[in-house]
Image (spheres, coloured by chain):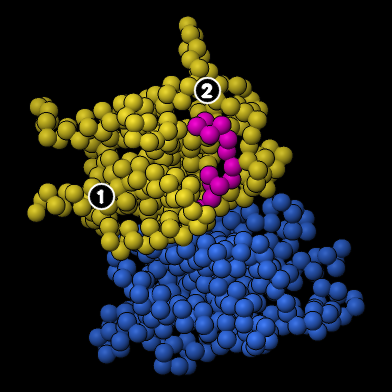
Chain colours: A yellow, B blue
Amino acid sequence: MGDIDINKQAPNVVVWLLLVAMPFWLPAIGGYPELGTRVVVLGLAAMSLNFLLGYTGVLSFGHAAYFGLGAYGVGMTIRYLMPSTGAGILVGVITGTIAAALIGPLIIRLRGVYFAMVTIAFGQVFFFIAFRWNSVTGGDDGLTGWTRMPLNLGFTSIDILHSPRVFYYFVLILFAIAVAIMAWLLRSPFGRTLIAIRENERRARFLGIPVDQHIWISWVISCGFVSLAGALYALLNNFVDPRALYWTQSGDFVIMAVLGGMRSFWGPLIGAAIYVVLQDYLSSETENWMSFIGLFFVLVVLFFPRGVLGMIRRKVAS
Amino acid sequence: MSQVVLFNVFNGLIVGAFYALMALGLSLIMNLSGVINFAHGGFLALGAYLAYTLMPYTGFWGALVLAPVFTAGLGLVVERLLIRRVYGRDPLYSLLLTFGLAFMFEDGMRFIWGAQSVPYQVPAWLLSPLSSDYFFLTGYRVFMVLLVAFAVIGLFVILNYTRLGIRIRAGTLDLETVSVLGVNVRILRNLNFGLGIYLAGLAGVLAAGMLGLQPTVGTSLIMPSFVAIIVGGLGSLPGTLLGGLLIGVASGVTTVFFPSATEAVMYVMMAAVLLVRPRGLLGEEGRF
């Protein structure tokens, strides 16, 4: 590797500059601070999903479950156990990761549509628990009565509740850590092995790679990061409801990844930005925004199956 | 007590019959075309709403005959215009496409018929209990079970004894060979899709009389249908039928003893089946 290739680094630099400067340029083009935070949080969710979807070639349609577990983990920790944002995030991520690790062995032998179907069905278990267990989760009305807590760093404490900008940077730091870990994993021999499995599972198996085990690890990593995104999402809203766990949420993550471009590292983030802005706009303009979102899904599948980055790359290549 | 248990077992059986009817349609489409049709619930609800709209003109019986046929007709059109385009591509795209369609269906029905449930009337004489000891045994419930049984038998007769059915089954095993033998695979898949949607429409017309009719009725039935397919065995239609009835009865029984776990129990069953027998109860080994 040695030398740093400027051409290869250019997209990274652009993305990071845009993200770091977001609170300054977003209001200028008509956005509000929470919109930017939502893009980063859902972008993280879509990128985590893409770790599995785009880089391992395994189609999960049930990631909302782990997103929601992260969200409920942080909410319930702050509400019932201890008023600490850090502890809440930790509990949320651990809950989501453990759930994924336990469900993993049941599903890793399945492939394609069947993997999708089983993941989505398992996701519903957590939805029903959140929905039915009124006394603890607040049921259909959601978990209220808690807010994100100031960050206690020992020598000082940072108020992330009242300033959207400070909270944005808090989210961005966690996003950066998560994304850096994923990028590092994908460049490691482990990540290359995942790509080999995606490209030709049978050949990978013949080479002696324990395919099921790799898929299981990739699944757990992907779900772990998605539960981090879920925890941040709950903190953003100071609220969780069962819809964060519902299967339609999983579909949103998949469309974000596809829309941006599954074969590229930043694609899902771009997809999330487009999707979040579109949804925000539609739901403020029309009551029938669901129809338009549905139509949008259909159009993406028919006309933009490679996603935004995939199309740009193709244009550049030709 | 035994009354309550019997009532819930019977109730579960009926709900399970709906799951099975819907899951059979899903299975047919998935086995031949490799498409998970998320919009299946939308078609089911559409069948019910069409019946609701037709009833003042045709009566219940006319609606029962016509609504599923119209629904299947729309299914043929949707397959021809949209679903066909994603055959042979990454399964991801068919999932997203039908997912988007499901959104459009649900919202479209909310737009046309309103978000609140509509009064769905079945003939009054069907609603009176048949027996004074077993108050829950109304004519409508017995009728539903019989009709579902009839539909399922009909489906298996079609699949086993008609040319179309034999081609569908052959195509499930090896579509390429069927195509080489001179069968028009496009038409075969189209008709197969219509057949699956017909079952969804029929389930909708019947289910609305028992579960009520609002735009979300289909969405609430689709997940159990997935579970029915997984429990029964991927690729096996008898398995799907068995799976649907099993989870229906299981949730019915659970309602008596532990009401808050009514939905969760079917997922527990699914986990147990996947753990012991990953291919499902009647699934063929090595197919998936």
In-front residue for pair A137/A27: A27
Query: Does residue A223 sit above or below A53 in this rendering?
Result: above
Q: Report which residue position mark 1 lands on.
A: A308
Query: Does residue B124 sit above or below B4 in this rendering?
Result: below
Kind of residue at badge 1: Val
Dominant secondary structure (helix, strand or loop) of the stretch shown in magenta:
helix
Name the residue at 44% across, 65% down. B101
Query: Does residue A229 sit above or below A158 in this rendering?
Result: below
Q: Give the range drawn in magenta.
A: A235-249
* Other residues around mark 2 within 10 Å, as few (<14) / some (14–19) / many (≥20): some
Residue B225 painted magenta:
no
SS at circle 1: helix
Quadrant position of the N terminus of chain B in the picture: bottom right
In-front residue for pair B133/B128: B128
Residue A26 rendering spot, x and y as whole percentages: 35, 32
In-front residue for pair A75/A98: A75
Dividing the picture into quarters, in which one does residue B256 lie? Answer: bottom right
Name the residue at 49% across, 89% down. B158
Residue B35 rendering spot, x and y as whole percentages: 40, 68
Q: Report which residue position mark 2 lands on.
A: A161
In-front residue for pair A189/B179: B179
